[in-house]
Amino acid sequence: MTYAQIVGWGYAVPSRIMTNSDIEQLVDTSDEWIRTRTGISERRIAGPKESTSTLATRAAQNALQVADLSPSKVDLVIVATSTPDFPMPSVASIVQDNIGAARAGAFDVNAACSGFIYALSVASGMIAGGLHENVLVIGADTLSRLVDWTDRSTCILFGDGAGAVLLRRSESPTGLRSCVLGSDGSGVGSLYVPAGGSRTPITAEQVQARQHFIKMKGGEVFRFAVHAIAQATQQAVQSAGMTMDDVDLFIPHQANIRIIQSAAKALKIPPEKVFSNVNRYGNTSTASIPIALCEAIEAGKVSVGSNLALVGFGAGLAWGAAIVQWGVDATPMPFAWWKSMVRNIQSREAVVRSFALRTQRRIDALRRVNGIHGV
Ligand code: UT7
């Protein structure tokens, strides 16, 4: 049998930190309210030169470095996001070009905050089905661009970031052991951005009415989340032929510490098996699970044979849970100067390659124009 093993991982967050006291300057709230109701102390906010694709690119490069894989060996780039740089093309195509993955296919997946689990299951299925050998799966979002900074019920929650894993074909029975995906589209109105899509294109009136920003019924989403996490995790554990005791680390979507604690309690998972970093990043949407996975690895909580329960939930309403059996040594490697040199050369090669392709396209266009004029 063929499996999809996680052999590389990496994340990227903007350097700009926005604390709760910074938000106190914008809306009627307090550090105390935010911390006690959400567990969030600070979040990262993308700068003017950053976007979903720049964060996704950095996360992907970090994952490739850990996997020790040249970008030219990547077969497919999948980016889970609901905040693409443009309505089209995909963020994945931009990342594919940025990293110089010259022979890779690329597409985006939108399942909001559950997107990383969806993308992971798609990639694992493609590898297990023999279609690909090396697939980059990235969860990246810049929800700060969709946040209404005058709405205190949402602007306190979200932050920006990206996390990536590199899946490689393997004969060893590790990687995704089971996956549960679900959706209840009747809950569209619980969490959505009303304007900016095909149903309600952006107009001056829509902008005036602030319809291009996130709208959320927080209580509804909270109740849905606790139920969805508990049910989906139980189903995924069962379908992997395991019991909850077999789960070594529970890494849920980082939306609110109260949601995480309530779900862990319902599942009877002890606090030492629950990973959370929501206090430092807030809700980074589809990036939250891969960022948390990377930080759990850094904290030495993941080793060969560990069973990880990853579970996402959010807009859709959609949810997804996955049991991942860890298969590779995650001990940080000592810094090797030559590896960072190789990485520098690879990223410069990618820039030159992209420039050459764009120049070629312009020359071709000029030739065609001249040809038409000459007729
Ligand atoms: O990725 C998945 C997406 N989202 C989520 O998972 C979010 C799920 N929901 C939540 O995390 C919580 O519902 C929130 C954190 C959004 C809100 O917490 P809550 O405990 O459900 O508060 P609430 O909405 O019931 O509001 C309680 C009170 C209200 O005042 P009144 O009506 O009782 O006087 C709100 O106006 O708290 C008020 N409030 C605030 N007060 C200070 C709401 N936001 C704030 C705020 N600062 N930022």
Image (cartoon, helix red, strand yellow):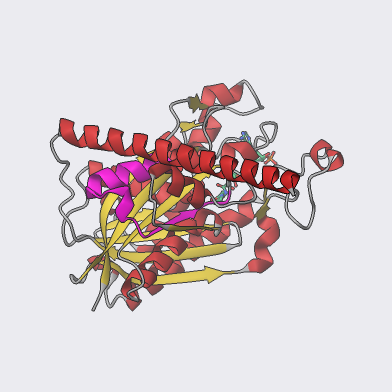
Point out the quarter of the image occupied by ligand 1: top right
Q: Work out whether residue 47 or residue 21 is closer to the camera in this orientation and state it.
A: 47
Q: Which of 76/49 is in front?
A: 76
Residue 84: x and y in percent read 58, 47
- On-image quarter of the N terminus: bottom left
User: What x and y, as percent, mark residue 22?
Assistant: 55, 22
Is residue 291 visible to the viewer in this orientation of the structure?
Answer: yes
Query: Is residue 74 toward the left or the right of residue 53 in the image?
Result: left
Q: Which residues are magenta?
A: 57-82
| Position of residue 113 measured from the top left corner of the image (x, y, whole percent) | 52, 54
Residue 62 is inside the magenta segment = yes
26 with respect to 208 (left or right): left
Residue drawn 31% across and 46% down? 63
User: From this viewpoint, which residue is outermost toward the front?
Assistant: 375
Q: Is residue 240 above or below residue 116?
A: below
Residue 276 visible in this rendered orientation of the protein: no
Using the image, determine if residue 212 lies above or below residue 261. Answer: above
Residue 128 left/right relative to 252: left
Q: Residue furthest right?
A: 205
**Which image quarter: residue 244?**
bottom left
Spot occupied by residue 313 in the image (x, y as percentages of width and height): 51, 58
